[in-house]
Amino acid sequence: QQHTPTTPPTDKVAAITGGGSGIGAAVAEQLAQAGYRVAVLDIQIDNARAVAQRLHAQRPDGAVALAIDVSSPQSVDEAFGALEQHFGKAADVLVNSAGIMPVAAVMECSWEMFRKAMDVNVGGTFLCSQRAARGMIAQRFGRIVNLASISSERAGVGRVAYGTSKTAITGLTRQFAMELGSHGITVNAVAPGPVLTPMTERNYTPETRAAFEATIPARRMGVTNEIANAIVYLCSDGAAYVNGVFLPVDGGYLAA
Ligand code: NAD
């Protein structure tokens, strides 16, 4: 699929963790279309390379794929160092889309499963935001968007690890927003409702999907571009006065 830039190229650099799949890949494509240079960061480097390859088609110097394990401080530091070397500047935008969804009931969830969700989803968001904010503070501009979830606000069977991690992400977002706001940086959370991606394809049965759809006012699951639209807005210059918000993009699920 060929993408045509809709706005002239800028010097702005966007880093998207989990950019090799699902919502992150849609964000990478939309930010490239909006003229950003894009670093696609993922633990699954082949997927990140495939996304970056598609973006190269529209701007040869505009995309790079980098391996990262967001739960490792050393890997995060190395990946952002490589990004800065590649583009000759720090990231202006960070979208923390890397995440995992372990599903297990309260009485069956192992410590390892619980801790992995916290390490990747919460720890990864913390480490990447802190590392990227170094450059953002120096350049007095930054946009950070975290992926929360409707699970941040609503309990669900099997969501003890995932839901707890997503609730923590909303708290983390507010902490960063408060302390970084005076540096020209905004930090916001987007909370998608159920969206069809490899993550939900792995975890949803036709029955759980139908049950969800019945309770969503829009009566359907979302698509990745609908989440990316909101993320791209929060990354824009025009969103400078939106800071620390929790923005559901869920077809009305949390309002119902
Ligand atoms: P996805 O599985 O399609 O993509 C997630 C990506 O994160 C994958 O490419 C994976 O390789 C990467 N990743 C996993 N662990 C990593 C690690 N340790 N280091 C680096 N990368 C790692 O999932 P998605 O549906 O696109 O979800 C993206 C984000 O949106 C997640 O944070 C998820 O919790 C959130 N979210 C998704 C939905 C949904 O319905 N799909 C709903 C609410 C929130």
Image: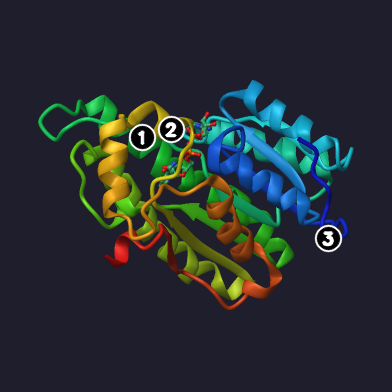
- Nearer mark to the viewer, of 3 and 1: 3
Q: Is mark 1 within 8 Å of ligand 1?
A: yes
- Residue type at mark 2? Met
Which quarter of the picture shows residue 45? top right
In-front residue for pair 228/75: 228
Q: Residues within 10 Å of mark 1 (few under 14, many from 20)?
A: many
Residue at the (66%, 55%) spot, across then down: 93
Residue with the mark numbered 2:
199
Lower sequence index among marks 3 and 1: 3
The quadrant holding residue 29 is top right
Residue occupying image coordinates x 30% and y 67%: 255
Q: Which residue is mark 1?
A: 101
Question: Which amino acid does the dot numbered 3 rest on?
Answer: Thr
Is the CB of the residue bearing disc 2 within 8 angstroms of ligand 1?
A: yes
Q: Position of residue 202 (x, y in %)?
A: 39, 26
Contact, CB < 8 Å: mark 2 with mark 1?
yes
Q: Could you say where residue 6 lies in the image, as x and y percent from the top left?
A: 82, 57
Q: Quadrant of the N terminus?
A: top right
Question: What secondary structure is marked by label 2?
Answer: helix
Percent coordinates x, y for residue 8 in the rendering: 88, 59
Q: Could you say which is closer to the camera, residue 58 or residue 206?
A: 206
On screen, residue 84 versus residue 222, left or right, reads right
Toward which corner of the image does residue 68 lie, by quadrant?
top right
Spatial CA distance of label 3 from label 2 is 31 Å
